[in-house]
Amino acid sequence: MSIVYILYSQKLNRFYIGYTSDFDLRLEFHKNATTRKFTYNATDWILFLKIDCTTKKQALSIEKHIKNMKSKTYIQNLLKYPEIIDKLVEKYSDC
């Protein structure tokens, strides 16, 4: 199973969107980043939202969709209105 995840840093007031098949390992990677990656700039990353996907292709499609929205409001609305997530999962279910 693949997962789309959104992390939030209060220090940066920024979101990070990614996907993985091993969320716990990936979260530790972000928290302990030692190279000049985007998540290196803060140590206070917390899980904002996690979306379970059935395939890697579906997860990549949903991740791309969210990134293309380029909107903090959209990301916040994903948490506020779970039906948006349901529609995304359904829209990309053929992937």
Image (cartoon, rainbow, N blue to C red):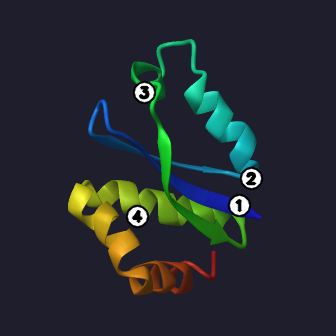
Question: Seen in the image, is 14 located left or right of residue 56?
Answer: left
Residue 13: percent from the left, percent from the top?
26, 39
| CA neighbours of label 1 inside 10 A, class few (<14), some (14 to 19), many (20+) | some
Which residue is painted at 54% across and 86% down in the image? Answer: 90
Label 3, on which residue? 38
Question: In which quadrant of the rendered view does residue 4 lie?
Answer: bottom right
Mark in the foreground, 3 or 4: 3
Q: Which numbered marker is on residue 21?
A: 2
Of callouts 2 and 4, which one flags the residue occurring earlier in the amino acid sequence?
A: 2
Label 1, on which residue? 2
Asked whether the residues under the numbered discs 2 and 3 touch, taking CB atoms below 8 Å apart as contact, a structural biologist would say no
Q: Is residue 71 visible?
A: no
Which residue is painted at 39% across and 20% down in the image? Answer: 41
Of callouts 3 and 4, which one flags the residue occurring earlier in the amino acid sequence?
A: 3
| CA neighbours of label 3 inside 10 A, class few (<14), some (14 to 19), many (20+) | few
Disc 4 marks a residue whose amino acid type is His
Of callouts 2 and 3, which one flags the residue occurring earlier in the amino acid sequence?
A: 2
Q: Which numbered marker is on residue 71?
A: none
Disc 1 marks a residue whose amino acid type is Ser
| CA neighbours of label 4 inside 10 A, class few (<14), some (14 to 19), many (20+) | few
Of callouts 1 and 3, which one flags the residue occurring earlier in the amino acid sequence?
A: 1
Query: In the structure shown, which secondary structural element does the residue marked by tag 4 occupy?
Result: helix
Disc 2 marks a residue whose amino acid type is Ser
Q: Which numbered marker is on residue 65?
A: 4
Of callouts 4 and 1, which one flags the residue occurring earlier in the amino acid sequence?
A: 1
